[in-house]
Image (tube, rainbow, N blue to C red):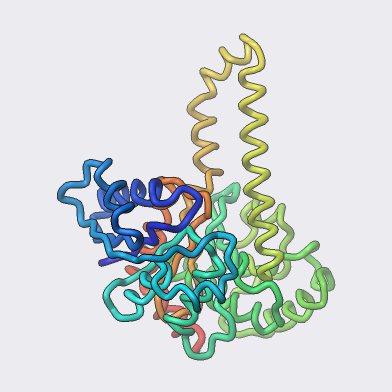
Amino acid sequence: MRIVLDAMGGDYAPREVVAGAVEAARAYGIELVLVGREEEVRAELDRHPAAGLPLSVVHAAEVIGMDEHPAMAVRRKRESSIVVGLQMVRDGQADAFVSAGNSGAVMAAATWLLGRIPGVERPALATVFPSRVGFFLVADIGANTDCRPEYLLQFGRMASAYAQHVLRIPEPRVALLANGEEETKGDRLVQEAHALFRQAAGLNFAGNIEPKDALAGGADVVIADGFVGNIFLKSTEAAAEVLLGMLREELTRNLWNRLSAALLRPAFRRLRRRLDYREYGGALLLGLRGVAVIAHGRSDARAIRSAVRVAREATLQGAVEAISKALQA
């Protein structure tokens, strides 16, 4: 297996991307190709004990910045690390692509170069969230801010197939994110989508779900339009960071608390690990004829390694084929 990494993508590229690539190559034993400005990438590689690891570098002269207009940047910068990397997947030179760079540019380039699975109206971004009892999958988290009800239904079919074949959930419970569990709750989009989901064959539809119930483990797959899904993503990330910060402040407030914290430190570390977005990797673009994973813009080495793991599992478990079959059925 060969996975391409956008070495120039993200707030801490290429330093953290290269470090994550070294960790991933050592952990998973797969070939990784770092695409970017060769001189900079090799300088970072030289800082690591990477001898013998299956790592290579492909030169890409241009970089798409995080603040650039996605579609315009993709058209203008054909020699960017994003475009060059995705071309390798399109041409069969690699099995998957991972980037922590400009997410809009990655989505635009991936849709253009890899193409959509026949019948897919809009690709959707899906990522795993921690819940009280394990985890659940959310789609869409930002690819489509303006949706029609049938788009949400398609997101549900694609995410359900991914949950079943890659996450190994036998009969994923699929729910619509709303402000109440009653079918009359939500805006017009959610209400009309609810009617489509209720009538859809082959989906284990669990109805509407509120954020608190999703985080409690009330569904395996949660569906929303990209605007609502992205707000949900960023709100839960922020809440987790605030919670962990408040716990840290309380545990170090005085001597007695610090002594108690020594006993609680293992539990605190486990909680921090469960809530850490870096452990869950990136978001897979569902509906494309290839595997493309978008990692968090502020990904460090651990997050990059986790994003590579997501791409590896999606490739090994045949996510593209599973989604295609689900939509044909």
Q: Is residue 168 visible?
A: no
- Residue drawn 41% across the image and 57% down it: 8
**Does 270 appear above or below 213?**
above
Q: Quadrant of the N terminus?
A: bottom left
- Residue drawn 29% across the image and 72% down it: 94
- Residue drawn 27% across the image and 51% down it: 42
**Does 124 appear above or below 196?**
above
The picture places residue 164, in percent across and down from the top left corner, at 47, 70
The picture places residue 141, in percent across and down from the top left corner, at 61, 65
- Residue drawn 39% across the image and 61% down it: 6
Residue at far left of view: 52
The answer to which image quadrant residue 199 occupies is bottom right
The picture places residue 202, in percent across and down from the top left corner, at 56, 82
The answer to which image quadrant residue 47 occupies is top left
The picture places residue 220, in percent across and down from the top left corner, at 57, 63
Residue nearest the observer in this picture, 304 or 228:
304
Residue nearest the observer in this picture, 237 or 4:
4
Residue nearest the observer in this picture, 315 or 106:
106
**Does 238 appear above or below 92?**
above
